[in-house]
Image: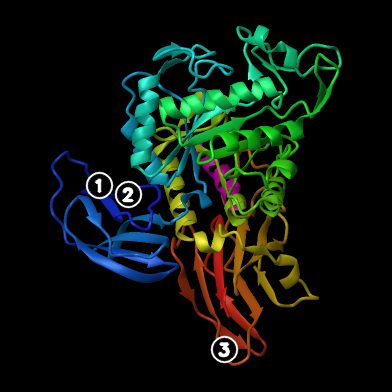
Amino acid sequence: MHHMTLLPTRSSYGPDDSIEVEIEIASENGRPSAAFDGELTVWLLGEQVGSVSVGSAGIHSLPALDSGSYGVELLLDGEVVARTAIEITADPRARLRYGFVAGYEPAKDVQAAARFARRLHLNGIQFYDWAYRHAELLGGGDDYVDALDQPIALSTVRELVAAYRAAGTDSLGYAAVYAVGPDEWHAWKQHALLRPSGEPYALGDFLFIVDPAAPEWLAHFRADLALASATVGFDGYHLDQYGYPKFAATPDGAVVDVAESFARLIEEVRDELPEARLIFNNVNDFPTWRTASLPQDAVYIEPWAPNDTLESLAELARRARASSAGQPVVLAAYQHVYDSVQPEEGDRAAALTMATLFSHGATQLLAGEDGRLLVDPYYVRNRPAEPETLAFLTRWYDFVVEHDALLMAPGISEVTSSYVGDYNGDLNVTFPDARVSSTPVAGSVWRRVTSAGSDLVVHLINLCGQTDTLWDAGRAATVSPAEGELRFRHVRGRVPRVRVADPDGTPRLVDLAVRLDGDDAIVALPVLNVWQVIHVVF
């Protein structure tokens, strides 16, 4: 008996790259894998667009493909035994599937980290706490301990950068934009941001905060990042802050609008590093309204209370997409819940978080290293994911890549309130034993409608059996309502096409039977798991 895995050779492919996937075979009895008679099929939004015969483990080329996002299936005797997805794009920074790495010990298995990035199609990796000090990134030589006594081998950092680059993944060095440690504070305290008491704002007693736009600090920060790019080879930087203060005085009595200081810093760093991939952390949405349209490569938000419900995540994603200049949106929604519940409960919480974000055109920073989860804002305190969790994440990340055109395209619009309800009468979903709601309500099916070009996409997120809508809390087992019904107004002279996909059910789009009844088209829906995506073509 053999277990087969399908893995892209890169997290993202350019139009001129060789499009290849790797077949891995794990034998339960330890014997070498035998030859087989199989087929790789390639799917574009549910339509087969290519196939190739395969008969062994290893790397296999796919037929020529245009730019786009595809599902790939491995068939044996006509049965799907493994799946993956691939992205082919001339602009890989148009999407961000973000991961992390937080360990740089000598002899680290960097290929295992790169392989995990390929598995989840992570095209950007945050190198958390790689530097010697927050205000002196490269002051430690080749081997050092960081400010929290973690061992760092700069050779390992470089090896990780090289391994990720070979896998089609960008490496982004972590850099706090206004943090200075005790050893360096004497050189920067004239730029301190002060509390009303006169004490400097700080992160505990560990880091002190300066005005990020102070000219002397900006010149130092720009030079430090440029040196790190030249020395380590980073593709860009993750620019971090702590969410406070919003306004503060400096020792000379000047009042600093910190949002404006952040904006100036982002623009200055872009000027210093015009080709770098830059991501700024808008902690609890501060100040997304000011930074989202600036020259960076994503709108990144780290949510904290009071942003603790699925609806608050949805609102953050909506506002970010509306404020951005078309950049991808990522939320660093840390699933602390994995530290306090059984893995399956954590998976259910993560599934509802991802369903909320993915259906709103955003992604989540959750996984990284060689298969670990973020459960704490200090990324070193990550935890290994169970095999079932890794399988679940793989299914869902494959799904979001394969259905990119229906989920992540910048032109997708929310149209729920224009289509549903008695006044509109254009579209509705009903279940015989479950309430349907246009907002996330515990115990209901959350129904949303988006417009993707001339098509509609209906999202059904299952909250049946839940007693609240907190996103970072253990979730009850999924309760699937009886089969639902989609009813919508069709166009005279045409029979619409309706298809459905589900990361935990039917992972690629499949057709559903459509029955016309007067002005309406009626479709019986399959059983709802956590998240169902319905594609309506008029």
> Mark 1 = which residue?
24
Residue nearest the observer in this picture, 175 or 498: 175
Q: Which residue is mark 2?
A: 7
Residue depicted at 61% across the width and 9% down the height: 184
- Please provide percent x and percent y for residue 201: 75, 17
Hey, which quadrant is residue 416 in on the image? Answer: bottom right
In primary-sequence order, the first of circles 2 and 3 is: 2
Mark 1 vs mark 2: in front: 2
Image x and y of residue 438, in percent: 72, 61
Position of residue 70 relative to residue 120, above or below, is below
Question: Secondary structure beneath disc 2?
Answer: strand
Give the camera-side residue of 537 and 519: 537
Q: Are marks 3 and 1 in contact (CB under 8 Å)?
A: no
Is residue 381 among the parts visible in the rendering?
Answer: no
Upstream in sequence: badge 1 or badge 2: 2
Please, what is the three-letter code of the amino acid marked with disc 3?
A: Arg
Amino acid residing under circle 2 = Leu
